[in-house]
Structures are given as C-alpha cells and as structure tokens.
Image: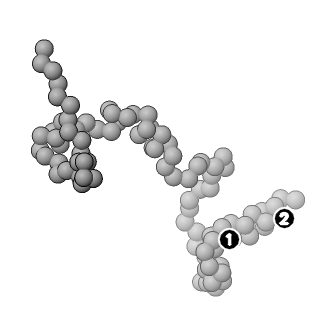
C-alpha cells in the first residue's frame, strides 16, 4: 500500500500564501464534505430570525398626498402606515 503524502501548507514559513496549482485545486473537496456542521450552522445563521406573526406583502394604491406625507417622515414609513391602519382596525372592531 502506497503511503499518502501530506500536502504542503498553503501558507509558507515566511507568511506568504502559495499560488494554488491545478493539481492542488483538483484535490479540493467542497466545504459541505469537509466541515458539514460548520456549513449547516452558517446557513442557519443567515438572515433575520423568523417572527411568529409575519406580515404579508401586497400591492396597495395610496393617494399621492398620503404617500408623500408618510415618505417625508423618512425611513420606516411603511411600518408607520401599518401602525395607523392597525389602530383604525382596533377602533372599528371595539
């Protein structure tokens, strides 16, 4: 049985990164094979955590005056529109 050679490290003793050869690239394996737990943890950590009550995306036509009023208030204007409509719904439901 032939003894397998240990590959040379990518970083040399002087701290410089060696150039990757075609042979070295051919021996590379996907990260999902080498460290599957790390890859899975990275995938799960991506993005914002899911909320229990998610909102639905719709198309809503608003008058130019209403749209200008909320947009003039800056970032988060869509959330403020949602808050105003939510208060209206609660008032009418009571």
Q: Is residue 80 above or below residue 42?
A: below
User: In front here: 26 or 14?
Assistant: 14
Q: Determine crowd level at label 1: few under 14, some 14-19, many 20+ residues with C-alpha closer than 10 A.
A: some
Q: Is residue 66 visible?
A: no
Find disc 2 in the rendering and name its residue. Answer: 91
Residue farthest to the top, as pictured: 1
Of pointers 1 and 2, the one earlier in the residue sequence:
1
Tell me the residue at 81%/61% (across/down).
90
Q: Position of residue 23 (x, y in %)?
A: 12, 40
- In which quadrant of the rendered image does the C terminus lie? bottom right
Find disc 1 in the rendering and name its residue. Answer: 81
- In front: label 1 or label 2: 1
Q: Position of residue 93 (x, y in %)?
A: 83, 59
User: In front here: 31 or 87?
Assistant: 31
- In which quadrant of the rendered image does the N terminus lie? top left
In the picture, measured across the screen, residue 18 lies left or right of residue 33, that is left
Q: Position of residue 67 (x, y in %)?
A: 61, 80
Question: For residue 72, what is the image quadrant?
Answer: bottom right
Q: Position of residue 47 (x, y in %)?
A: 51, 52
Q: Is residue 94 visible?
A: yes
Q: Secondary structure at mark 1?
A: helix
Tell me the residue at 23%/48% (across/down).
12
Which circle marks residue 90 in the picture? Answer: none
Tell me the residue at 32%/32% (across/down).
33
Q: Is residue 83 above or below residue 44?
A: below
Q: Is residue 14 above or below residue 86?
A: above
3D distance between C-alphas at marks 1 and 2: 16 Å
Q: Secondary structure at mark 2?
A: helix
In the picture, measured across the screen, residue 94 lies left or right of residue 31, that is right
Tell me the residue at 59%/48% (across/down).
50
Q: Determine crowd level at label 2: few under 14, some 14-19, many 20+ residues with C-alpha closer than 10 A.
A: few
């Amino acid at each position: 049985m032939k003894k397998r050679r240990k590959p040379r490290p990518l970083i040399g003793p002087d701290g410089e990164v060696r150039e990757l050869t075609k042979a070295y690239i051919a021996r590379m394996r996907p990260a999902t094979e080498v460290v599957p737990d790390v890859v899975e943890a990275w995938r799960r950590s991506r993005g914002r955590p899911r909320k229990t009550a998610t909102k639905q995306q719709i198309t809503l036509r608003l008058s130019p005056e209403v749209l200008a009023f909320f947009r003039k208030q800056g970032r988060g204007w869509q959330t403020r529109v949602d808050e105003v409509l939510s208060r209206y719904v609660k008032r009418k439901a009571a």
